[in-house]
Image (cartoon, grey):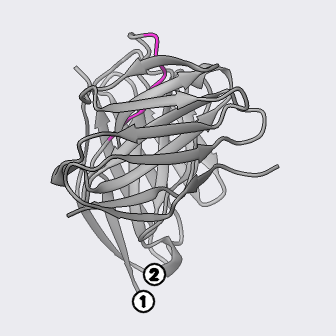
Amino acid sequence: GEDVEQSLFLSVREGDSSVINCTYTDSSSTYLYWYKQEPGAGLQLLTYIFSNMDMKQDQRLTVLLNKKDKHLSLRIADTQTGDSAIYFCAETPTTSGTYKYIFGTGTRLKVLA
Amino acid sequence: ETGVTQSPTHLIKTRGQQVTLRCSSQSGHNTVSWYQQALGQGPQFIFQYYREEENGRGNFPPRFSGLQFPNYSSELNVNALELDDSALYLCASSPNSGKETQYFGPGTRLLVL
């Protein structure tokens, strides 16, 4: 089946690290993505990881992938108030031949000053 | 290089009416995917167009239809609108039939009364 799960809320203090977790179901996903959505806006690509990698670092962002457990995480270092948003992970199952994204319900990150 | 654009930004319709939403893909991208994002949910895949042909469809009824034009822009049409069709409609463009990263537009917010 195709299902992506995320916790709904996360609250951190400014300057701390944030870790947002995601579990997915489809092992055929070639890429796994993290998108950010600010209020009233579309989705902004943050980063992605290829399925044969364990970790990817991109400035303040670190993505960890545990393919055995189908677990993906996004760590944001030195979290700022501008990071407050909803974060979506997405898997990309390819079994149907269509490269659609399956999104989680999103994690709302609130950064406290 | 221009990004993905969508029009209109907001729309109010009544039950039973029909609506057309438009999307201009990013330069060089031949694939457009449409997603519906209900309030508080992650985006759900509606369908994808690749080189003017439908290339996969999600679990949406036939009253959701689409088109892709030779310049790779796209339309989403919804007939016989229902209250539950109220949502943010996102389009995403990508090169190479969606195998690579999809880039999202700002969305059209549709309210059905």
- The residue positioned 49% from the left and 18% from the top of the image is B54
Left or right relative to B43: residue B80? left
Q: Secondary structure at mark 2?
A: loop
Residue A102 on the magenta segment: yes
Q: Is residue A70 magenta?
A: no
Residue named by callout 1: A113
Labels 2 and 1 in the same subunit: yes
The amino acid at mark 1 is Ala
Q: Secondary structure at mark 1?
A: loop
Query: Looking at the rendering, which quadrant does residue A12 occupy?
Result: bottom left
**Residue A63 appears at what percent x and percent y?**
50, 44
| Cβ atoms under marks 2 and 1 closer than 8 Å | yes
What amino acid type should be assigned to the residue bearing mark 2?
A: Glu
Mark 2 nearby-residue class (10 Å; few <14, some 14–19, many ≥20): some
Q: Quadrant of the rendered structure where residue A19 is?
A: bottom left
Which residue sits at x=58%, y=25%? B98
Along the line of sight, which residue is nearer the eye, A15 or B104? B104
Which x, y percent locates residue B80?
23, 42
What residue is pinned by disc 2?
Answer: A14
Q: Quadrant of the C terminus of chain B?
A: bottom left
Q: Position of residue A59 (x, y in %)?
A: 66, 57
Chain for numbered disc 1: A
Q: Magenta region: which residues?
A: A97-103
Q: Which residue ends up furthest to the front in the rendered image?
A: B17
Rendered view: A52 above or below A86? above
**Label 2 to label 1: alpha-carbon separation:** 5 Å
